[in-house]
Amino acid sequence: MNLSFQRAAGWLKTFAPQMMNPTEATERYKRVDAMSQAMILVRLAHMMTIAARGSYEIGTDGVRDPIALRRSNEVMHRVTGQIRALLEGDERRFPDDVIIRIIDGLQDDAHQMLFVEAVSEIDAQNEEGEQGMAGQPA
């Protein structure tokens, strides 16, 4: 596993223990509307780009972990495609179970924790009344 992803997973487990677990996050994701799912996936995609930087060679244009970068890019491609499909109302989008399996397919705790964090952030906004899970003001 990429060191940046390991660090992200460790940080989240240590400093964000109030977050839901992956199973709870998955169930929550499945219950929300398309706009909320898109918001969750946008947050996940943003966090994945940050974590993927760990595969770069510091101070150069090189890549020290091309396999991790390629795997991350493939998941990013599917996640951003799902966001597009959700926003466009495309019925040919991945079913919820499939997109979650794609994210889980990286088989590392860090990507699961990034997904959990993304769901938790949207959930926290709902609880704080800043923005509802449907993307509408509470």
Image: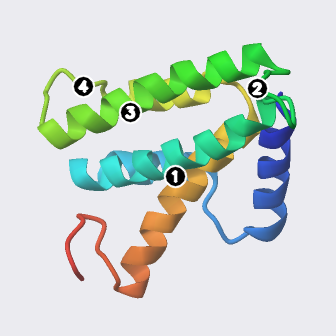
Quadrant, the N terminus? top right
Label 2 amino acid? Answer: Asp
| Mark 4 crowdedness (10 Å alpha carbons): few <14, some 14-19, many ≥20 | some
> In the rendered view, does 53 fall on the left or right side of 23?
right
Q: Name the residue under label 2.
A: 61
Residue at x 48%, y 52% (from the top left corner): 43
| Mark 1 crowdedness (10 Å alpha carbons): few <14, some 14-19, many ≥20 | many
Q: Name the residue under label 4.
A: 93
User: Disc 1 to disc 2, how far (Cα)?
Assistant: 36 Å
Quick check: 81 above or below 71? below
User: Disc 3 to disc 4, how far (Cα)?
Assistant: 11 Å
Mark 1 or mark 2: which comes first in sequence? Answer: 1
User: Disc 1 to disc 3, how far (Cα)?
Assistant: 19 Å
Residue at x 85%, y 52% (from the top left corner): 10
Q: Name the residue under label 3.
A: 80
Q: Name the residue under label 1.
A: 25
Mark 3 or mark 4: which comes first in sequence? Answer: 3
Q: Can residue 138 be seen in this view?
A: yes
Spot occupied by residue 90 in the image (x, y as percentages of width and height): 14, 29
Spot occupied by residue 81 in the image (x, y as percentages of width and height): 33, 27
Could you tell me which secondary element the residue under label 1 belongs to? helix
Front tag of 1 and 3: 3
Mark 1 or mark 4: which comes first in sequence? Answer: 1
